[in-house]
Amino acid sequence: MPQTATTGNLENAQKIIISAARYTEEHNAPALALIESFSLGKGEKQVTVPKVGQMSMSDLVDGQDIVDEEEIGMTTVDLTASEVGAKVIITDKLLRQSAVNVMSIIGRQLGDGMARKKDTDVHALYSGFDTGLSQAATSMTLTNVAKAISYAKANKFGSQVYILQHPNAVYDIAATAVTASSTYPVPKGWSEDLLGEFFSGLRPLNGVAIFEDGNLSVDANDDAVGVIADKSALCVLNSVQTKTERQRDASLRATEIVMTSDYGVFELDDSRGASLTFDAANQSIAAD
């Protein structure tokens, strides 16, 4: 009796792929977990986020009216979303002959692809900040990091400031700032579940945590553009969370698995972030 790919087989395979893809995507996009998140409701085209300025208090004299009037200083940022996606074709023969782990592998591949896309979309925003605190060929030393943090605090970036850079750049500070046999947990306020694997393990400097992201691109001169910013500096707008759909192609004797997401990433407040360009050349391991 010939073997066939039954509906039950397809449903089980799809569940395995979806489960692996969702988990992988969620836990492999650290840049996305470090920024603000908004949702686009059904029937909505965009989300408009307001920003207001600062007000000043005046000294008053008893019996005299308040003369100074303060301006709200409101500006807005419009957020919209767009679709991204990928397709995998699973033949009936593959489905009949494969083990469960093959479906998990497909799920991980899809999840990694979606996570990498979202992660690098956020990275592309870093160079858009008006302020750049370092230049090409600069080492990520403890002194340079401390200077960047002092700037962020002096210019009131916010209460949840972080640094994200390439692992090769973070090495320069780790080589001099790590205490032997000491590791530190993800600081309070950040998700251990989502960011634990990307936390540098360094003791937060002046309360600022340093995260590593290997998806950060390194240019031809071995430099990487990272960021020091408050969580509110950048944002993601989610219209449709990652989803998968299945479509049968009888003539191909296969089933298409399509993964899509509808989102957008944006600079929300330029005054709360700055780019950090550091040398990110591969480190060489010397013989003892």
Image: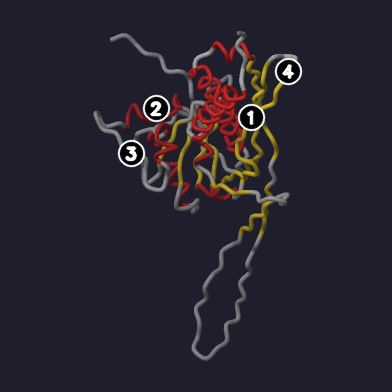
Of residues 189 and 208, the one nearer the viewer is 189
Can you identify the residue that label 3 sits on?
185
Residue drawn where x is 48% and y is 20% of the image? 281
- Check disc 1 and report the residue beneath it: 259
Determine the residue positioned at 24% across, 29% down: 181
Could you tell me which residue is drawn at 62 percent across and 24 percent down?
7
- Secondary structure beneath dot 1 equals strand
Q: Please, which residue is most extreme toward the bottom here?
A: 63
How far is disc 2 from disc 4 in space, using C-alphas?
56 Å
Distance from disc 2 to disc 3, alpha carbons, whole Å, reads 20 Å
**Residue corresponding to mark 4:** 250
Q: Quadrant of residue 82?
A: top right
Upstream in the sequence, badge 2 or badge 4? 2
Circles 4 and 1, Cβ within 8 Å, touching? The answer is: no
Mark 3 or mark 4, which is nearer the start of the sequence?
Answer: 3
Q: Amino acid at mark 1?
A: Met
Q: Secondary structure at mark 4?
A: loop
Q: Is 85 on the left or on the right of 272, as rendered?
A: right
- Sequence-wise first label, 4 or 1: 4
Q: CA distance from mark 1 to mark 3?
A: 34 Å
